[in-house]
Image (tube, grey):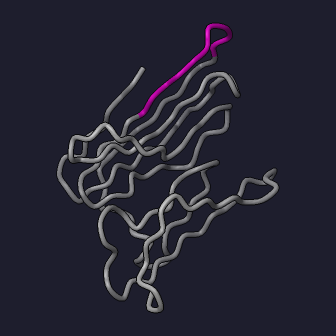
Amino acid sequence: CTWVIVPSEGGLSIHLQFTAFDMMAGFDYVQIFSRPANGSDDLQLIANLTGSTIPAAIFSVNQRGDSMVVKLTSDESVTKAGFVANYKMVASPSPCLGEGVTLNAESGELTTGLGSYFNNDYCTWVIVPSADAHGIRLQFTAFDMEDGYD
């Protein structure tokens, strides 16, 4: 099953909040992707969820009206109760305003958004590992900053 959530106007982010979550750990999972507003099928994975712990709220962090794709994949054997999630359109949370953005999902993506970042930005992301985590792995898939200034 696949659901596509499209923001009602550009500049808004999608806030997805799970109120129930019960998937067969390691066999059934929910993947959350961001799809560019330009019509491309180039999906970026935001979260890969399995198990029975209700995930933290998920935001599509964008400034250009990207849609959110929610994909449920299950195997052929045991099934569980599934999930219930609510979504709403909100002003984009910015890692560059206030106290930044706190991330506590099992996996996710940090980004300054598509296109150039702004001058004089000071952005903060706080990654909070789960209680049973042994560390945090941060892998850069793209990195382009002005040498000597940023």
Quadrant of the rendering where the N terminus is positioned = top left
Tell me which residue sits at (78%, 53%) in the image: 133
Percent position of residue 147, x then y: 45, 86
Q: Residue furthest left?
A: 9
Tell me which residue sits at (58%, 31%) in the image: 21
Taking depth in this image into account, of 59 and 119 the one nearest to the observer is 119
Q: Residue furthest top?
A: 76
| Residue 27 relative to residue 37: left or right | right
Tell me which residue sits at (33%, 58%) in the image: 62
User: In the displayed structure, would residue 83 be above or below residue 9?
Assistant: above
Percent position of residue 142, x then y: 48, 62
Q: Give the magenta-colored segment's residue range.
A: 70-79
Please state the total of marks drawn on the protein image. Answer: 0
User: In the displayed structure, would residue 95 be above or below residue 30?
Assistant: below
Main SS, magenta residues: loop
- Quarter occupied by residue 11: bottom left
Q: Residue furthest front?
A: 147
Tell me which residue sits at (48%, 30%) in the image: 84
User: In the displayed structure, would residue 67 be above or below residue 121?
Assistant: above
| Residue 115 relative to residue 23: left or right | left
Percent position of residue 99, x then y: 50, 77
| Residue 14 relative to residue 150: left or right | left
- Quarter occupied by residue 26: top right
Percent position of residue 79, x then y: 63, 13
Quadrant of the rendering where the C terminus is positioned = bottom left
- Quarter occupied by residue 95: bottom left
